[in-house]
Image (spheres, coloured by chain):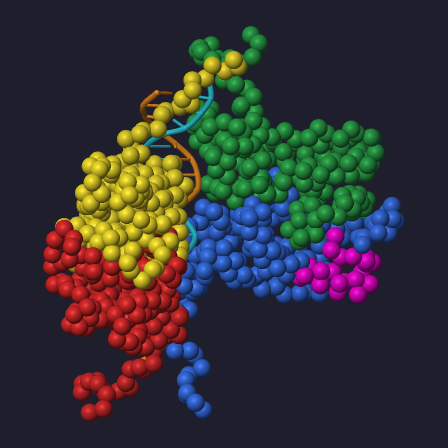
Chain colours: A green, B blue, C yellow, D red, E orange, F cyan
Amino acid sequence: MAGTRNPHSAGRPRSAEKEAAILSAALGLLASQGYTRMSLGQVAATAGVSTSTIHLRWKTKADLVTAALASARMADAPPASGDLRTDLIAILVDFSATIERVNGMALIGTCLAEEAHTPELLALLRQRTVLPRRALLREALERARAAGEFEAEDLEPLVSALLGPFYADYMAGRSGDPGWAARAVDLVLAGLRGLPEGPGIAYS
Amino acid sequence: MAGTRNPHSAGRPRSAEKEAAILSAALGLLASQGYTRMSLGQVAATAGVSTSTIHLRWKTKADLVTAALASARMADAPPASGDLRTDLIAILVDFSATIERVNGMALIGTCLAEEAHTPELLALLRQRTVLPRRALLREALERARAAGEFEAEDLEPLVSALLGPFYADYMAGRSGDPGWAARAVDLVLAGLRGLPEGPGIAYS
Amino acid sequence: MAGTRNPHSAGRPRSAEKEAAILSAALGLLASQGYTRMSLGQVAATAGVSTSTIHLRWKTKADLVTAALASARMADAPPASGDLRTDLIAILVDFSATIERVNGMALIGTCLAEEAHTPELLALLRQRTVLPRRALLREALERARAAGEFEAEDLEPLVSALLGPFYADYMAGRSGDPGWAARAVDLVLAGLRGLPEGPGIAYS
Amino acid sequence: MAGTRNPHSAGRPRSAEKEAAILSAALGLLASQGYTRMSLGQVAATAGVSTSTIHLRWKTKADLVTAALASARMADAPPASGDLRTDLIAILVDFSATIERVNGMALIGTCLAEEAHTPELLALLRQRTVLPRRALLREALERARAAGEFEAEDLEPLVSALLGPFYADYMAGRSGDPGWAARAVDLVLAGLRGLPEGPGIAYS
DNA sequence: GATGAATGAGCATTCATTCAT
DNA sequence: TATGAATGAATGCTCATTCAT
């Protein structure tokens, strides 16, 4: 009842601590070394186990990395204040802080680079980290739209407009400026106000 | 006078075709395999040369990849129409088309993933592809600003706001929609119009 | 108390046969091929293991060769008869026989040739084979000196005078004559008797 | 008539300077690197030519090294004083000085190590350096024997007894003591005086 | 004659994975 | 369960040698 012990697994149960240590080590090394450069030996050494112990739980390297990415939890959502601008900025600031904390751009790069060989990586990254973050932004926008603060059919382009500058700045070597979040939010909010008189491009 | 040696130094001249084939093969494999997975043997086989021929020109694998990235030329700039919206959209459409054509996101991913080990890769990618594209956008904006179409002190955040949605869409698995460029441009232009009455965030 | 782990650490034990086979193969190939020409592939094939098994035990080629040289045991000392001349000749005969048996001059040549790059080789050869042999000769001389058979302060030059002709003969292409040992011993013994009236060169 | 120009070699004659530079570079690198580690590229770079120029004159690496060894000249003989002891010591001192000057022990080691693969090396070393030096010693001994200073049938063992301690000292790590030559000579001369009353070992 | 390009063979080392204990 | 031994496949790189200029 308690725990997910398989009925058929007799004998000593697998150590949950080891499992967690392995996944954590794998995630960190994945970000710092990249998929191909990260070796199971490094993971084993960092986690304090043997490589055989890793293979006992995951059949291949790809399996381990997939599991490690699946275990990556997004940071908890910042509390909502009710003010749209404040909430959006808070989410974006938390986003860039998280990226920095976990060496996220390298992790993203690894998943992009491996997309041809191991598409699950990018898929998992999306599901576990990108989409939840976008959902936070979308929900904040939905609340404001429901409150009549603006009109828009499809919110996804707005979400991309909010997050996008971070990536673009990073690619340009301009990351590190904490003002980016406020600027992105203000541009989008200004655009939302200016759009109705715009050339009539439907946001859908 | 002493020694009427030809200016092109003695011995058999280096084959320009081989050199081009190697660089092209390296660039393609870099995008499809990533830095670590790409082997010099693959490059040699694809280019139809021996691995020694590669080492004759570039001392190490990193040197070759660096040269390959340095040889990556940005597509020529789309012709300027004079209309800001049209020009910006043209640049962005060309941008996403180029990325698709050369498997650019995988290449970007490789450079991001290798940043810790081989920072030259990302630096070169910036210098050769990212910054020139940004310059095109900035110049179009500068022309319009000079014509009095809008006011803004620092154009870089606008450039990031134009390019950013592409990256954000890709990360969300939403790429492929050709309408992204027009939406990004319109949002930015609307924001530029709406900003003067905005909360006073200076774009600098 | 905590952890009743067996003293011989966990996991599959290392095969002592393989280890011995590798060291033996390495020593033989070192003599027949020289350090640089000897490849780990050859060693592995001769020992019937994979090259990875070699690297599991020794990190580098130099480590392996060092270990192989360190494992080279000098043949057991010939039994002492009590008669100085007999004992010295026995030691020298055993010396040249050992050299022939293990292709010793090639091994010596390798260590000399590599002295600039891998000085440990010559150092080990000295420590493991040269100096023990010299100690045997010195002890025999010491016993006779203690018995009053001759006088001499420093025995080392006498040891070199006993061993030296072997090397000089080899360099001259004159090796193979078994009489060299008796001649060397008799010359030294005669010199010891003749020296007191000699020109007064102190042997120290 | 002047020069050894082949009748069939028309066109530009081969540069004698280059040839000498190559041989000298090869000899030096042979001593400092050993046969296998010495690369033709190193030789070419040191001599200031291309590797192809080397292959133009010698077909293989072994050919080049053989020629280099054949070009090694022994230093001129020290002038004879007429006194046996003085002359022998002079020859031995010059011997060890030459060895030190040209890194001779490494060169000897290389020839010994390569004996199985390239026996010509050791053969050439003998012919060009070892045997001429022995001849000097033998001639000095012969002059003294003819003058009735001692009796001995075969002088070769005496020559080996004179040279041998140098090798033995080197192998023991005891080289560098300039007194070795005098000690070796005195021991041999004392032995020659003491031998007639010795156990009757014929020196032949 | 002299040079630089081009190559095939080889080498030490790493690594994911499978066995034996 | 957990560990260390063992391995096959690869990889970046070097080098002696042959070609083309």
Name the image quarter holding residue C78: top left
Taking the spot 38% from the left edge, 73% from the top edge, the residue there is D47
In this rendering, the count of numbered labels is 0
Magenta stretch: give its range. Answer: B135-157
Name the image quarter holding residue C136: top left
Q: Which residue is outermost to the top?
A: A1
Depth check, front residue: A66 or B163: A66
- Picture coordinates of residue D48 (x, y %)? 39, 74
Report whether residue C46 is seen: yes
- Picture coordinates of residue C97 (x, y %)? 19, 45
- Name the dominant secondary structure of the magenta segment: helix
Taking the image as shown, residue D32 lies to the left or right of residue A109, namely left
Taking the image as shown, residue C42 lies to the left or right of residue D197, namely right
Taking the image as shown, residue C163 lies to the left or right of residue A72, namely left
Depth check, front residue: D177 or B36: D177
- Picture coordinates of residue B132 (x, y %)? 63, 61
A56 falls in the magenta region: no
Taking the spot 38% from the left edge, 48% from the top edge, the residue there is C123
Name the image quarter holding residue B47: bottom left
Depth check, front residue: B14 or D87: D87
Taking the spot 78% from the left edge, 28% from the top edge, the residue there is A79
- Picture coordinates of residue D38 (x, y %)? 34, 62
B139 falls in the magenta region: yes
Taking the spot 78% from the left edge, 39% from the top edge, the residue there is A89
Compared to residue B184, the image places residue D179 above or below, namely: below
Q: Which residue is outermost to the front?
A: C197
Compared to residue D15, the image places residue F14 above or below, namely: above
Report whether residue C139 is seen: no
